[in-house]
Image (cartoon, coloured by chain):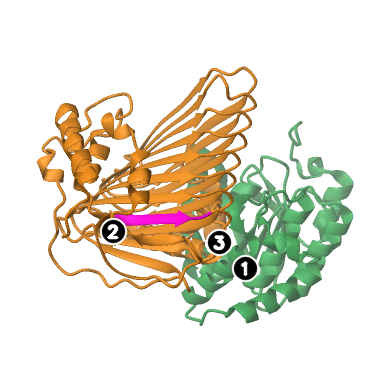
């Protein structure tokens, strides 16, 4: 490994001081329903390669720009010729070249001072992706990131995206880590005026893995974040996503779905900061919970005094497939402006007996009827992925997970 | 084909069917008429295998074998079809996807090959045209936003598409205007065949003006109190349930 830029070495010293000061996340309002295993220490979470074979990756999207990572390091990719000025590159390479953009984008990140996992990521990451799209360039090809942590590995990855005004790009992430792998990935998105960024995450790690994600997006005037997360894997996962609507008429869509079984625990925590007038935020979060799984949704909409004409909407829906499954939903509206439209809702339900009987009376087996109803419930959220070939990847993974859950239910 | 023997059934501990016996041979059309609360809909659900109805005594034979232990989908695979009084709305599932899934599930259960997409669409279109069901309706989620008449036409479409051998129609005429009633009746008449039987459950005579039954049974308080030919339905129409010694509930 080549020497780190000296500024990064300095930052890491500071990051390690923060970690020592903060320790791992303890019970707090933000970590109300989720905790890391008690036996875990900071040292256990230092970057570490795993063992066993690496998966063979195959891009499922025609013409995609691909970057494949194993144990938190870039191993190969398919990087075609890009429009002038566009950078899509592994961070390791950009750090080796000491690209000033990396320092600027990383510099945007301040929450590390209060969040030890982000500090830990800063201290430990050696790779990730830098996406830079200059003014007015709309990238048609999606960027496809595949990340695989081998057995027992600890993966720290950083993804930096900077879109200049009127630019557009799409990032798809597919995580498929092996047994007991830990992933701690931090995303920092900086969206220039009227730019548009599509971010689709598919977390399909092994059922024993841990997956921690932070996503922070700064949105300038008229820009739009279009985010969708599908959580299928990991024993323990948490995604903390924060949007700052800094310019007027910015839009943030933060949508998520989870399909869990066994003893899986998935936490989706969002904070939408409306700090400019006329901005729009939309959130639909759906959980399907089987076995003894547990879903957590904490969604906060914070409307600052200046943010008049804010339009905020948040919906959390859960479908419980077993009596032992559990959902914890905590919607929060904090509003300091007086001319805003904000709403939130939460529903918890079970599969409808009438619908089950109707479908079965037409010949569908219990498994098939259940699968169809679950799919119908989740499809509503998956429809948020506007591009069909990308949506298909998510739908296929969701269906595969669903048959696993049905099999488990059938054996029980 | 279908033989119901001394059937007793309860819902939440209340006995609704109190010893109902009925035999239906292949190709026959039977009508069961009865006032509200006589147990007509319970009979249809019990025949289709709904789990929250508890059969406390008696048996149901289909092709001479008891179907009592069979799940609703297993009964469907044998060829039993219930046209619902209140078809269920299912958001998020396109009707056409559901129809193809159902048809293929039945074919698999019967050891037949699945139908391919092109052949399915042709079959669906043929049936839909006869019933005045538009492509737009087929793309919509199952029964969501359909009028009462559209829902009943969709039931008729499923009946025609899935080609059952024993059709049970639960108050199909309720909520239908005269045109929809005619379309639904024509569908039944078109499907009448020597190896296909119908059990038409209804409160009123008017559906039987369009579908001529072979036998009519009068049901009251959970059992059949009189059986006969179509003339029974006319007598009922003319003289009311009182002519059969049945007190109709005020709500009916």
Above-or-below relation of A348 to B130: above
Q: Which chain is green?
A: B
Which residue is disc 1 drawn over? B166
Tag 1, which chain?
A: B
Q: Position of residue B195 (x, y in %)?
A: 65, 78
Quarter placement of the N terminus of chain A:
bottom left
Q: CA distance from mark 3 to mark 1?
A: 45 Å
Query: Which labelled disc corresponds to residue A144?
Result: none
Q: Position of residue A375 (x, y in %)?
A: 49, 55
Residue B211 is inside the magenta segment:
no
Drawn side of residue A82 relative to residue B183, left or right:
left
Residue plotted at (30% across, 31% down): A33
Residue A275 at what x, y percent from top left?
A: 53, 27
Q: Residues within 10 Å of mark 2 (few under 14, many from 20)?
A: few
Q: Is residue A129 magenta?
A: yes
Ranked by sequence position, the earlier of labels 3 and 2 is 2
Q: Residue A387 — which label?
A: 3
Residue placed at 25% from the left, 58% from the top?
Answer: A96
Give the chain letter for orange.
Answer: A
Q: Which residue is mark 2?
A: A97
Frontmost residue, A231 versus A408: A231
Q: Is residue B6 visible?
A: no
Q: The residue marked by circle 3 belongs to what chain?
A: A
Query: Vertically, is B126 above or below A280?
Result: below
């Amino acid at each position: 490994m080549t020497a780190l830029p000296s500024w990064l070495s300095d930052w890491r010293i500071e990051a390690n001081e923060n970690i020592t000061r903060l320790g791992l996340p303890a019970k707090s309002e933000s970590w109300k329903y989720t905790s890391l295993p008690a036996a875990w220490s900071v040292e256990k979470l230092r970057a570490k390669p795993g063992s066993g074979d690496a998966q063979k990756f195959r891009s499922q999207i025609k013409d995609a720009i691909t970057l494949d990572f194993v144990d938190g390091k870039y191993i190969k990719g398919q990087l075609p010729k890009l429009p002038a000025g566009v950078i899509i590159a592994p961070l390791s390479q950009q750090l080796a070249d000491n690209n000033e953009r990396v320092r600027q984008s990383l510099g945007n990140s301040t929450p590390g001072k209060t969040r030890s996992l982000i500090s830990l990521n800063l201290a430990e990451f050696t790779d990730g992706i830098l996406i830079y799209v200059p003014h007015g360039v709309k990238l048609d090809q999606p960027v496809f990131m595949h990340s695989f942590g081998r057995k027992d590995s600890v993966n720290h990855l950083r993804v930096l995206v900077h879109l200049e005004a009127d630019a557009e790009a799409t990032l798809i992430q597919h995580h498929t880590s092996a047994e007991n792998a830990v992933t701690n990935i931090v995303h920092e998105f900086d969206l220039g005026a009227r730019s548009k960024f599509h971010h689709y995450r598919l977390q399909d790690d092994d059922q024993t893995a841990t997956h921690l994600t932070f996503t922070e997006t700064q949105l300038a005037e008229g820009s739009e974040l279009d985010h969708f997360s599908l959580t299928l894997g990991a024993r323990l996962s948490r995604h903390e996503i924060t949007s700052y609507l800094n310019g007027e008429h910015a839009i943030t869509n933060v949508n998520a779905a989870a399909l869990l079984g066994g003893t899986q625990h998935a936490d989706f925590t969002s904070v939408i900061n409306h700090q400019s007038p006329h901005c729009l935020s939309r959130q639909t979060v759906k959980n399907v919970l089987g076995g003894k799984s547990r879903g957590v949704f904490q969604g906060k909409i914070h409307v600052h005094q200046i943010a008049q004409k804010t339009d905020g909407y948040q919906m959390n829906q859960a479908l419980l497939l077993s009596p032992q499954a559990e959902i914890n939903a905590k919607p929060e509206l904090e509003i300091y402006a007086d001319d805003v439209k904000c709403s939130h809702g939460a529903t918890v339900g079970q599969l409808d007996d009438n619908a089950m009987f109707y479908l079965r009376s037409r010949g569908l087996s219990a498994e098939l009827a259940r699968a169809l109803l679950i799919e119908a419930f989740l499809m509503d959220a998956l429809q948020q992925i506007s591009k069909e070939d990308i949506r298909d990847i998510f739908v296929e993974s969701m269906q595969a997970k669903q048959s696993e859950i049905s099999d488990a239910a059938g054996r029980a | 084909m279908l033989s119901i023997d001394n059937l007793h059934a309860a819902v939440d501990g209340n006995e609704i069917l109190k010893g109902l016996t009925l035999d239906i041979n292949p190709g026959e059309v039977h009508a069961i008429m009865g006032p509200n609360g006589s147990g007509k809909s319970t009979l249809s659900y019990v025949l289709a295998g709904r789990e929250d109805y508890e059969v406390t005594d008696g048996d149901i034979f289909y092709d001479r074998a008891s179907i009592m232990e069979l799940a609703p989908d297993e009964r469907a695979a044998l060829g039993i079809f219930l046209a619902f009084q209140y078809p269920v709305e299912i958001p998020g599932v396109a009707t056409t996807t559901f129809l193809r899934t159902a048809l293929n599930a039945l074919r698999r259960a019967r050891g037949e090959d699945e139908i391919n997409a092109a052949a399915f669409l042709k079959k669906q279109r043929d049936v839909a045209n006869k019933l005045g069901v538009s492509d737009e309706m087929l793309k919509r989620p199952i029964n969501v936003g359909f009028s009462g008449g559209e829902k009943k036409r969709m039931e008729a479409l499923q009946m025609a598409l899935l080609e059952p051998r024993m059709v049970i129609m639960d108050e199909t005429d309720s909520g239908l205007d005269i045109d929809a009633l005619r379309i639904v009746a024509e569908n039944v008449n078109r499907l009448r065949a020597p190896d296909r039987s119908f059990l038409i459950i209804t409160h009123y005579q008017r559906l039987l003006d369009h579908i001529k039954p072979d036998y009519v049974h009068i049901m009251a308080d959970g059992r059949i109190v009189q059986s006969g030919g179509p003339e029974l339905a006319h007598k009922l129409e003319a003289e009311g349930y009182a002519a059969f010694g049945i007190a109709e509930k005020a709500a009916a």
